[in-house]
Image (spheres, helix red, strand yellow):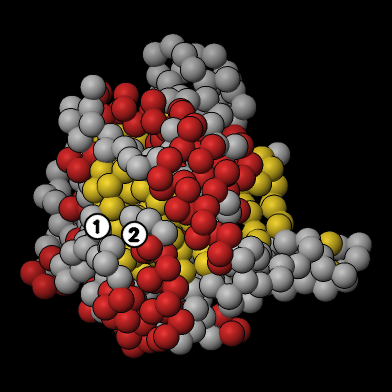
Amino acid sequence: MPDLSIDCAGIKSPNPFWLASAPPANSGLQVQRAFDAGWGGAVWKTLGVPIQNVSSRFGGVTIRGVQGAGFNNIELITDRSLETNFREIYETKKKYPKNAVVVSLMVETREEWKDIIKRSVDAGADGLELNFGCPHGMCERGMGSAVGQEPRVNQEITSWAVEFSTVPVLVKLTPNVADIVPHGLAARRGGAHGVSLINTIKSIIGVDIDRFVPEPRVAGLSTNGGYCGAAVKPIALHMVAQLARSKDFGIPISGIGGVSNWRDAVEFILLGSTSVQVCTEVMLRGYRVVEDMIEGLGDYMTTHGFKSVAEMVGKAVPSYSEWGDLDLNYETVAKIDPSKCIGCHLCVTACHDGAHQCIHPQGSEPAVKLKLPVPNGGSHARVPLVDESECVGCNLCKIVCPVPDCISMVSVENGFQPSTWNEHVTEGAKLRPKKGAH
């Protein structure tokens, strides 16, 4: 049985799955129920000067029938007293000593940071997470992403926290920047033991086209909020990987952003995350989603020969490269499995209208004119034909195909040696001829 336990920047937990700082980690009873369900850790909903939230505060986008594929909130930090929060943190940590309890913090002045850090540590926090990412409400008050977008301020406040804290300090970074690396490096210079990313993305989730008001509505008005959920995973993966491969970074990462299942978690770990935080999926499905995550991760580790999560961390980072280092002479073409094709011709439409016009119905004028060969088992008229001489291997047909593994992108030999753009520019390496549309 593989070992799922982790040590993220000195914060230990029985598995890498943590609740992110959000409504599911708002109270002691909630966090305790989450631990009972199997969560390895929790980042407590951000503490600071308690605020008054608005109503309503959540918005969701439905993408082709999937509700909550994208999620948005205009909720702020805790609206409960600090005394209540610290009492519940103490009770939770005492009851669950093996689970990680990380306390998220957001205040303004040096003295406020000193006071709230001391109280957090005294309450039993295993670590702290500095919320430098909130993109609404708090940033207008000089906190949240207002800090996260300024490396100098990030570094200074981080240094305060590290000075005052006796437990590990993570810095939660905002994605609302052009390049994440300078902000991660600022946290490192400030002495952070690790970083968490991404926080939510500044957004408007949608507009009520009958009332002419953005969502969610608050007495006829609305504002920008923080975008999260499954739809943001590609952005989060990119930013995690950017930091993980930076030679000057070198501190642990807690990955956040669109984790919905164990496969998502594995992707974050392979790109450099030691722990993985989840929020939206819990809000939509409940704490028990972690059961499948734990089981799936364990099965994956067994199948791939990993004995510990630490062996997985960053395994895919070396293969994340710059475009100029990709082999321009590597060539693939689409292959359709006739035994699986259902004749929907979605690939034909996509290829003709959105790609390179190289997939044709049998009997069509282009197919007859080009004398495209019919593959074995593909004599049925429903199976489209691929003009491999024009196929550029773009992958669009495979993406739109509704049948798993019906279309494959197969590499082909073309007689050209591997060559990158950088090699072509510097050494004059020869590139294969371009293919063009009819």
Asked if disc 2 and disc 1 are in contact, CB closer than 8 Å, the reply is yes
Q: Quadrant of residue 226?
A: bottom right
Relative placement, left or right, of 395 versus 352 is left
Report x, y in % for residue 224: 67, 72
* Type of the residue with mark 2: Gly
Q: Residue at x 52, y 52 (%)?
A: 88
User: Which element is circle 1 on?
Assistant: loop
The residue labelled by disc 2 is 127
**Where's the N terminus, which quadrant?**
top left
Label 1 belongs to which residue?
9
Q: Position of residue 219 (x, y in %)?
A: 87, 70
Label 1 crowd bin: few (<14), some (14–19), many (20+), radius 10 Å: many
Gap in angstroms between the C-alphas marked 2 and 1: 9 Å
> Which residue of the protein is positioned furthest toward the left in this rendering?
427
Taking the image as shown, residue 90 lies to the left or right of residue 6, namely: right
Q: Is residue 292 above or below residue 119?
A: above
Q: Nearer the viewer, residue 179 or 344?
A: 179
Tell me which numbered mark, 2 or 1, is placed earlier along the sequence: 1
Q: Is residue 305 left or right of residue 66?
A: left
* Amino acid tagged 1: Ala
Q: Local crowd at mark 2 within 10 Å, few (<14), some, or many (≥20)? A: many
Q: Residue at x 54, y 14 (%)?
A: 380
Residue 352 in view here: no
Does the image show residue 223? yes
- Between 359 and 44, the residue placed more toward the observer is 44
- When the figure is inspected, residue 111 is found, relative to residue 211, above or below; the finding is below
